[in-house]
């Protein structure tokens, strides 16, 4: 490093450049923080939108201010306007909300499909609802649940059984409940430990299990368990992130301590340099002015002794500070190593959680949630590049017969067998997922409807000719599909709907065939 005395110009130039670099780094850090805060505010305004119509215009204005070049005056103005609007918003009337919800619930309980026969209990409940007895919806639901649980002679039935009176009045009512129930179960993402129960329950619903009340109770119990499992996972992740945040805070404190020590050391060095400089200047002055050689000798010795003492003291202090800083650096390094290990562990856990959440437990194919993520991505790519994409929906023909004749274990084996054929028949750029039950879904990227038909026919023939055996017997398996291509202003829902209709036509025309959906123009 250049000296301010020997090379003052180089010294001050280097010092200026260091300060300039430091200032630029600080400015960049501030800009990044400002961008992150802006993104956070914008997302919070989206999250808060819709809670009160009076606040929505202010949230929109605040969002627009954050998206433009940020000016403190504009931001303060919008924040003040938002706060004023929040003050003017009247408190919500929970009793009115509870009353409206209660009347809807009462209408549901009185519907003929439910055949809820305790009319006296319904009359009491209606009177309490209309008089705004329930201050909140939670109080309303608690009262209804208590009333259902108190019905005599029905302790052995589940809560759905008590709600529906133990039976369904007609097959039409039953079919109205089975379809939504099956759709609900398919839409729920279950942990790996509960996935098999979910699949078995879906099969019982779709294949006409006679005990619909029991199915409803089982479904409710399963969804409750899924919620509990997800809550445990979220709690474990929250605890882990909290511990990680605390350790990052400790690491930050250590960093600040080291920075303060470095600043203190620099200040001491500056003070020592000034003291030594003063002694050297005194020596120069004495050498220039003193004529008595003996006095000059004494002055030089005294000042040199002082300089030596100062330097020795400075050396001792620097050694102590260096030892302390080395100890802290080792501590920080150890904390960093532990933090890196925990971060790797978190990444592994998150990766495993992602795989579990997006993988079908039986076939190991991507599941419906993974399909949803992929189709949204492929739609965006298609809109940008207009590369052809075809969607194919597969359904195993007469799959229920396999379960009925050979058992669910054979049905699971057939699903795994067909999934291997499907995944081995496509390119790495394509996508295959289990959509639910005996349905699979496929995205053929870069393939128009004619190419997709050729690929699908080849797969259909492979499955028709496959050698599938269970319990020592060869079982014939066929599969049907419907397909459609992205065209015009399609959304992925439009393409899926056409492919689903084409699959329906394939089933109507005798199964074991592939049908291409016509595009509605």
Image (tube, grey):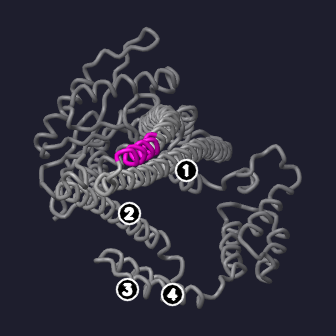
Answer whether labels 4 and 1 touch (C-beta < 8 Å). no
Answer whether labels 2 and 4 touch (C-beta < 8 Å). no
**Could you tell me which residue is drawn at 20 percent across and 51 percent down?**
6
* Residue extent of the magenta highlight: 293-308
Residue in front for this viewpoint, 154 or 71: 71
Q: Looking at the image, is 108 positioned above or below residue 55? A: above
Gap in Å between the C-alphas at discs 4 and 1?
38 Å
Name the secondary structure under disc 4: loop
Extreme residue in the right direction: 152
Q: Earlier in the sequence, mark 2 or mark 4?
A: 2
Toward which corner of the image does residue 305 lie, by quadrant?
Answer: top left
Name the secondary structure under disc 1: helix
Residue in front for this viewpoint, 189 or 232: 232
Look at the image and say whether residue 422 sits in the magenta stretch. no
- The label number, if any, that marks residue 181 in the structure image: 1
The picture places residue 296, in percent across and down from the top left corner, at 37, 48
Q: Nearer the viewer, mark 2 or mark 3?
A: 2
Gap in Å between the C-alphas at discs 2 and 1?
47 Å
Q: Earlier in the sequence, mark 2 or mark 1?
A: 2
Gap in Å between the C-alphas at discs 2 and 3?
19 Å
Q: Is residue 349 visible?
A: no
Extreme residue in the top direction: 472
Q: Earlier in the sequence, mark 4 or mark 1?
A: 4
Residue bearing mark 2: 33
Q: Tell me if mark 3 has few (under 14), some (14-19) or many (20+) residues whose alpha carbon lies within 10 angstroms of its own.
A: few
For the C terminus, give its image quadrant: bottom left
The picture places residue 264, in percent across and down from the top left corner, at 48, 51
Q: Tell me if mark 4 has few (under 14), some (14-19) or many (20+) residues whose alpha carbon lies within 10 angstroms of its own.
A: some
Q: Earlier in the sequence, mark 1 or mark 3?
A: 3
Look at the image and say whether residue 305 sits in the magenta stretch. yes
Residue bearing mark 3: 74
């Amino acid at each position: 490093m250049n000296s301010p005395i020997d090379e003052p110009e180089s010294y001050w130039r280097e010092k200026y450049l260091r300060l300039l670099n430091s200032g630029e780094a600080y400015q960049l850090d501030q800009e990044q923080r400002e961008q992150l805060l802006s993104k956070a505010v914008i997302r919070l305004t989206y999250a808060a939108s819709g809670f009160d119509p009076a606040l929505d215009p202010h949230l929109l204005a605040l969002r627009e201010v954050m998206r433009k070049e940020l000016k403190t005056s504009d931001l303060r103005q919008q924040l003040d306007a938002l706060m004023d609007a929040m003050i003017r918003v009247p408190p919500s009337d929970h009793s009115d909300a509870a009353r409206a919800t209660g009347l809807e619930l009462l209408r549901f309980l009185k519907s003929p499909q439910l055949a809820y026969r305790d009319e006296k209990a319904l009359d009491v409940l209606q009177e309490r609802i209309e008089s705004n007895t329930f201050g909140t919806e939670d109080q309303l639901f608690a009262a209804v649940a208590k009333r259902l649980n108190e019905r005599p002679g029905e302790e052995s039935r589940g809560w759905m059984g008590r709600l529906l009176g133990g039976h369904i009045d007609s097959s039409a009512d039953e079919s109205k409940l089975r379809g939504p129930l099956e759709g609900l179960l398919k839409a729920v993402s279950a942990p790996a430990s509960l996935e098999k129960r979910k699949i078995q329950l879906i099969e019982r619903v779709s294949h006409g299990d006679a005990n619909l009340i029991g199915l409803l109770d089982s479904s409710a119990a399963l969804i409750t368990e899924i919620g509990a499992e997800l809550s445990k996972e979220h709690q474990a992740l929250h605890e882990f992130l909290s511990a990680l945040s605390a350790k990052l805070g400790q690491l930050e404190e250590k960093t600040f301590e080291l920075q303060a020590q470095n600043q203190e050391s620099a200040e001491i060095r500056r003070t020592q340099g000034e003291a030594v400089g003063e002694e050297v200047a005194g020596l120069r002055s004495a050498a220039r002015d003193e004529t008595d050689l003996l006095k000059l000798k004494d002055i030089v010795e005294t000042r040199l002794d002082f300089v030596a003492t100062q330097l020795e003291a400075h050396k001792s202090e620097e050694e102590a500070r260096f030892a302390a800083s080395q100890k802290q650096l080792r501590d920080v390094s150890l904390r960093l190593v532990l933090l890196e290990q925990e971060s790797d562990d978190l990444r592994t856990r998150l990766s495993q959680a992602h795989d579990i959440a997006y993988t079908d437990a039986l076939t190991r194919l991507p599941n419906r949630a993974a399909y949803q993520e992929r189709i949204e991505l492929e739609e965006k790519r298609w809109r940008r590049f207009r590369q052809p994409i075809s969607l194919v929906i597969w359904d195993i023909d007469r799959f229920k017969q396999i379960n009925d004749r050979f058992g669910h274990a054979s049905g699971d084996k057939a699903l795994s067998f067909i999934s291997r054929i499907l995944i081995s028949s496509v390119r790495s750029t394509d996508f295959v997922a289990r959509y639910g039950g005996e349905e699979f879904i496929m995205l053929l990227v870069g393939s128009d409807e004619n190419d997709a038909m050729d690929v699908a026919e080849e797969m259909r023939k492979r499955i028709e000719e496959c050698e599938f055996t269970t319990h020592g017997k060869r079982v014939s398996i066929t599969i049907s599909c419907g397909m459609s291509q992205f065209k015009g202003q399609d959304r992925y829902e439009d393409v899926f709907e056409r492919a689903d209709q084409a699959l329906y036509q394939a089933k109507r025309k005798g199964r074991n065939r592939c049908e291409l959906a016509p595009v509605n123009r």
